[in-house]
Image (cartoon, helix red, strand yellow):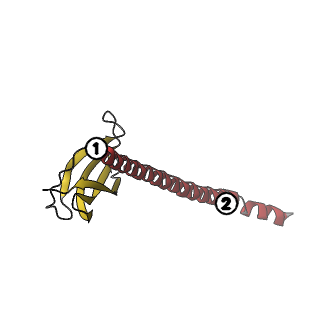
Amino acid sequence: MRTTIQTRNSQRGAALIVGLMMLLILTVLVASSMTTTFMEAQMAGNLQQAEYAFQAAESAADAEIAAGEPIMYDGDEVTGDVVRGTTTYNYPNAADPVATVGVDTVYRQQAFSSDTQVEVHFEVRAVADTTERAGRSVQRGGFYVLAPVPN
């Protein structure tokens, strides 16, 4: 019986050490999972801001094409000339914008011409910047206009 008592006495602190080791392992796992969760939340926020920028640039480019504003074309343009000045839009509205978009229309090329008409290619460039996390999107859209030959 003496051996049994000595074994018990020598194991008294073993439970405490094993318990502390388990607690340390759980603490490391919890800290690691919290870091991962925080990073995933940051990534989701960045993705949302990028999507806001994309939607803002797309809608501004569409609005610019559909605007029907006059385009200054006299036949002397070279590729890249701005033919309709920069317009600034707040997306989705001016009261609470999540992105600001600058849109301009540039001359690309003359595609076809006859004695009376000319087909001219233009490009709309929209650059959207979000108000948070520096989200940015650049969208381009082209369109053709059939116009009278400039004098």
Q: Position of residue 66 (x, y in %)?
A: 33, 45
- With 141 as the anchor, is 86 left or right in this view? left
Q: Element under label 1?
A: loop
Q: Nearer the viewer, residue 18 or 6?
A: 18
**Corner quadrant of residue 138:** bottom left
Position in image of residue 23 (x %, y %):
61, 55
Which is in the foreground here, disc 1 or disc 2? 1
| Rendering coords of residue 107 (x, y %) | 22, 59
Q: Amino acid at mark 1?
A: Gly
The residue where tag 1 is placed is 68
Residue at 37% in and 39% down: 92
Count neighbours of disc 1 (C-alpha within 10 A) and say few if under 14, some if 14 to 19, many if 20 or more: few
Q: Residue furthest bottom?
A: 3
Q: Which residue is mark 2?
A: 18
User: As shown in the figure, which amino acid type bears the numbered disc 2?
Assistant: Val
Few, some or many residues within 10 Å of mark 2 (<14, 14–19, 20+): few
Q: Which mark is residue 45?
A: none
The span from disc 1 to disc 2 (Cα, nearest Å) is: 77 Å
